[in-house]
Image: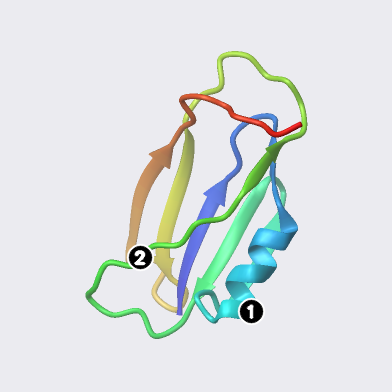
Amino acid sequence: VVLVDVKMLSGFTPLMSSLEQLENSGQIMKTEVKNNHVLFYLDNVFDTANSFTFSVEQSNLVSNIHPAPVVVYNYHEKDEYAFGSYSIDNISGSQ
């Protein structure tokens, strides 16, 4: 099992419907939202690239939003991990 820990950008929260859609499609085994982090549990991960997308919504207006960390690690071997980060360049919304 591989765990992808995505810290939310300041002022943003995940759209629960997009997380449920990932689980229902079988792309993600399980998701959890805890302490401003979204945890994605992936099963059957091999030496191939894997990607998925989820949606967020802006819950608070925050200026100067800093990049947020992403940590990927083996659930059973926590010393096997990788770090990354992500940021947002522009915000588009629907009325």
Closest to the observer, 83 or 63: 63
* Residue type pointed to by label 1: Asn
Pointer 1: residues within 10 angstroms few (<14), some, or many (20+)?
Answer: few
Q: Which mark is residue 35?
A: none
Seen in the image, is 52 located left or right of residue 46? Answer: right
- Left or right? Give the position of 55 relative to 60: left
| Image spot of residue 54 (x, y percent) | 57, 55
Q: Secondary structure at mark 1?
A: helix
Q: Position of residue 47 (x, y in %)?
A: 22, 75
The answer to which image quadrant residue 64 occupies is top right
Q: Residue furthest left?
A: 47
The x and y percentages for residue 39 are 59, 61
Mark 1 / mark 2, whichever is N-terminal: 1
Q: Are marks 1 and 2 in contact (CB under 8 Å)?
A: no
Report the residue at 36% width, 45% height from top: 84
Q: Measure how far apart labels 1 and 2 are at the Cα level.
A: 30 Å
Crowd rating for badge 2 (residues with CA inside 10 Å; few <14, some 14–19, many 20+): few
Q: Is residue 86 left or right of residue 31?
A: left
In this image, 30 relative to 28: left or right?
A: right
Report the amino acid beneath label 2.
Asp
The x and y percentages for residue 41 are: 53, 72
What residue lies at 38% left-to-right and 62% top-to-bottom? 51
Image quarter of the C terminus:
top right
Residue that mark 1 sits on: 24
- Total tally of numbered discs in the picture: 2
Residue 79 — which label? Answer: 2
Residue found at the far front of this picture:
95
